[in-house]
Amino acid sequence: MADSKLIVTPAPHIRGNIDTPSLMRDVVIALLPACLAGVYFFGGKALISLVAGVAGCVGAEFVFERMSKKPVTIGDWSAVVTGLLIAMVLPPHVPAWIVVLSGVFAIGIVKLLFGGLGYNVFNPALAGRAFATAAWSALAATGYIWPASAQGAAWARGIDAVTSATPLTLLKMGEIGGTSMSRFYMPLFLGNVAGSLGETSALALLIGAVYLLWRTHISLRIPMSYIITVAVVTALYGQDPLFHVLSGGLILGAFFMATDYVTSPINAKGQVIFGIGCGVLTALIRLFGGYPEGVAYSILIMNAAVPMIDRFARPKRFGEVKARA
Amino acid sequence: MKQLLVILFSQALVNNYMLARILGTCPFIGVSQQFETATGMSLAVVFVMTMASVITWLVQHFILNPLGMAYLQTVSFILVIAALVQLIEMVIKKNSPGLYRALGIYLPLITTNCAVLGVAIINISSNYNLVESAVSGAAGGLGWGLAIMLFAAIRERQRLAPISQAMQGFPIALVTTGLLAMAFLGFSGFDVARFIGL
C-alpha cells in the first residue's frame, strides 16, 4: 500500500515538480526568521533548545526506522521541521532534555507508529508540546522568561534569567485586562515579551508566512479563517481582539501548524470549517479554559476532527442532483 | 435552565465519558472500525444512557432510599440497565436488522458498559434531580458518541496507512485513543458555569 500512487485530492489535478524535501526545506527557511528572533530575545539557551529539538526528532526518526527495518527518511527534512517547531512552541528555558524527549515522542509515537509522514493523525510538534505539558507541567510552565534586553539588571546581579508570566497568563490571572491593551501591541508585534521560544515575534513569523505564501505552499484559507474567528469571538466577549491576535501562539499556529497538509482537510470548504473550529476553540479556551493559551489544544482537537470534516465536506460528484423525494 | 446547559457542556465535553473519564472503552475500541456502525452505536448509547439515568434515579429515590437499601445500588442498577438493553436490542433487531448485525456482540455488551453504570452512579452522587439526571445521561451519551465518531473516521483512514504489523488493529487504536484524550486535555479546567453566564 505504501508504494501505491493513490493521492487523495479533489480535482483538478496538475503534476508539479515540488517534492517533499524541497517543500520541507522551504518551511525550514520560513521558520528561520522566527528562530533568529527567539535567539535574539531569549539568548543562547534558545539556540540550545532549537538544536535539542532538531537532534531529538532526527535521532528518533533514524533509530525508530532502523528498529522497524523501514527505509530511513531523515533526508526529507520533515523531522527537522518538527524539531524546530517543538523547540518553538515550548518555553525558552525548559531543560534541553524535555525538548529532546518531546521530540522523541512526537516522531516516534505520533508520526512513525501511525505509518510515517502522510499518515499521522495529529500534528507531531503540537502533540509533543501537549505531552510535555502533561508530563512535566511544572517544569514546562516555569520556563517563560523576560527577553534578554530586559534582563541586563538581573545579569549584573549574577542571575541567569528571570522567569515571568506571559501576557496571556497575566490576562488569565486578572492582572491586566480591561480595554487599554494598546501598550502591548508593539512589544507583541516585535516579540519583546515573555512567551514560547518562537511564538513571540509576530513580525518574524509573518515574514516566514509571506515566504510560504509566495512559494504557494500554503493558502490563506485556514490562517485567515482561524485568525478572524479568534478576533470576532474575543471581540464578542468584550476583549481586545488585536491583543488576542498578536499574543500567544496564534500566528505561529495558524500559519505553520494548522496548515500542515497531512492534518488539515483536503478541500476549501473543509479548510474553512477547520479554521473556524480552531478559532472558536482557541478563543473559548483562552477566555474560560483552565489554560492561558489554547492554540495547541484547539489545533489538536480539530486535527482529530479532520477525517470527519473530510467526510462531510466532500465535493458533489459531477452531474449529481439532489434526489427528489 | 442555565444549570441544565452547564450539565450538558460539562458532561459532553469537559468530563467526556470516553476521553476524560476513560469509561466505555470496550465498545469504543470494538465498534469503531466503520463510521456508520459507530453512528448507530452512538445513538444506542445516547438512548440507553438517557433511559438508564431516568430509571435508575427513580429506583434510587423511590425504592432504595425509602427502604434504606442504598448499599444495593450497584446490583440493582446493573439489573435495570440489563433489562433496558434487552429491550433496545429487540427494537433494533426488528427495525434495523443491518445495524443489528453490524453491532453484533457489542449491543448486549452495553449491559456491562461501565459508562452507562457510571452515568447512573454519577447522577446520584452529584445530587441531580430527575430532569438534571436525564440531561446528564443524554449529554454523556452525546459526548461519548462524538468521541467514537471522530475515532471511527480516523480509523477508517488508518486502514490505508503502512502501520507496522505489530501495531495494526487494537494497538494503534489504543495509541490513537491516548492521543485523542491528550487533545481533549484542552478542555480540562474549562469554566462551564462562567461560559454559560451563571
Image (cartoon, coloured by chain):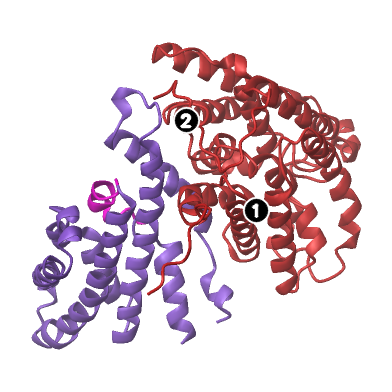
Instruction: Tell me the amino acid under the disc marked 1.
Output: Glu
Question: Which residue was labeled with disc 1?
Answer: A293
The answer, for residue B127, to whether it is visible in the render is no
Mark 2 element type? loop
Q: Nearer the viewer, residue A80 or A160?
A: A80
Q: Nearer the viewer, residue A57 or A135?
A: A57
Q: Nearer the viewer, residue A124 or B162?
A: B162
Instruction: Tell me the amino acid under the disc marked 2.
Output: Leu
Q: Chain of mark 2?
A: A
Relative height, residue A121 to residue A298 (above, below) = above
On the image, the x and y values in percent for residue A316 come to: 51, 55
Q: Nearer the viewer, residue A172 or A3?
A: A3
Quadrant where the image shows the C terminus of chain B? bottom right
On the image, the x and y values in percent for residue B23 come to: 29, 56
- Which chain did the image draw in purple? B
Relative height, residue A239 to residue B59 (above, below) = above
Location of residue B4 (image quadrant): bottom left
Mark 1 element type? loop
Q: Is residue A122 left or right of residue A201?
A: left
Q: Colour of chain A?
A: red
Q: Residue at x 56, y 47 (%)?
A: A265
Relative height, residue B60 to residue B188 (above, below) = below
Reply yes or no: does residue A165 show up in magenta. Answer: no
On the image, the x and y values in percent for residue B73 come to: 14, 72
On the image, the x and y values in percent for residue A158 come to: 83, 30
Q: Is residue B121 left or right of residue A318?
A: left
Location of residue B124 (image quadrant): bottom left
Question: Which residue was labeled with disc 2?
Answer: A6
Q: Chain of mark 1?
A: A
Highlighted range, magenta: B21-33
Badge 1 or badge 2: first in the primary sequence: 2
